[in-house]
Image (tube, rainbow, N blue to C red):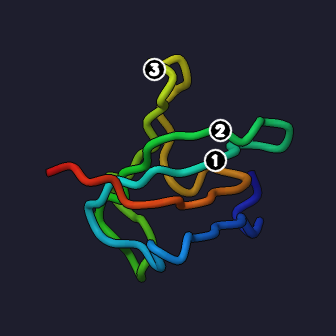
Amino acid sequence: MSSNKKMAVTFSVAVGKWKSQTWYLVNVSFFKGNPIHRSLFFSGYLTNGVPGSYNCFVPLNGGIEEVRVYPCFETLEVLREVDTK
């Protein structure tokens, strides 16, 4: 993936912006032709307002898909925060 490629990130109104060390339910497509699918995403630590260190996507399909880190996607729709308490 080209480093200057603009990737689409959209947030639901309820989410608004990234929070540090927070789990999110997302719809994601990792590359052109990859179907959009649901995943969990951990934001890790933020750098300039976006996920930086220790972030990851975790598949909801029993771990068949490899774990990936931000920003390795074609499109990302952040649906909501996941309450982990």
Q: Position of residue 40 (x, y in %)?
A: 44, 43
Occupied quadrant, residue 78: bottom right
Label placed on residue 28: 1
Report the residue marked by disc 3: 63
Which of the marked residues, 1 or 2, is nearer the chain's N terminus? Answer: 1
Task: Name the residue located 45 percent from the left edge and 18 percent from the top edge.
Answer: 62
| 10 up-or-down from 35: above or below | below
Amino acid residing under circle 1: Val
Q: Position of residue 81 (x, y in %)?
A: 37, 60
Which of the marked residues, 2 or 3, is nearer the chain's N terminus? Answer: 2
Occupied quadrant, residue 77: bottom right
Residue furthest to the front in view is 14
Q: Position of residue 24 (x, y in %)?
A: 41, 55
Asked if marks 1 and 2 touch (Cβ < 8 Å), the reply is yes
Label placed on residue 37: 2
Instruction: Please tell me whether mark 2 or mark 3 is closer to you in this view.
Output: 2
Dot 1 falls on a residue whose secondary structure is strand
Disc 3 crowd, CA 10 A, few/some/many (<14, 14-19, 20+): few
Cα separation between marks 2 and 3: 13 Å
Q: Position of residue 59 (x, y in %)?
A: 48, 31
Task: Name the residue located 21 percent from the left edge and 49 percent from the top edge.
Answer: 84
Dot 2 falls on a residue whose secondary structure is strand
Amino acid residing under circle 3: Gly
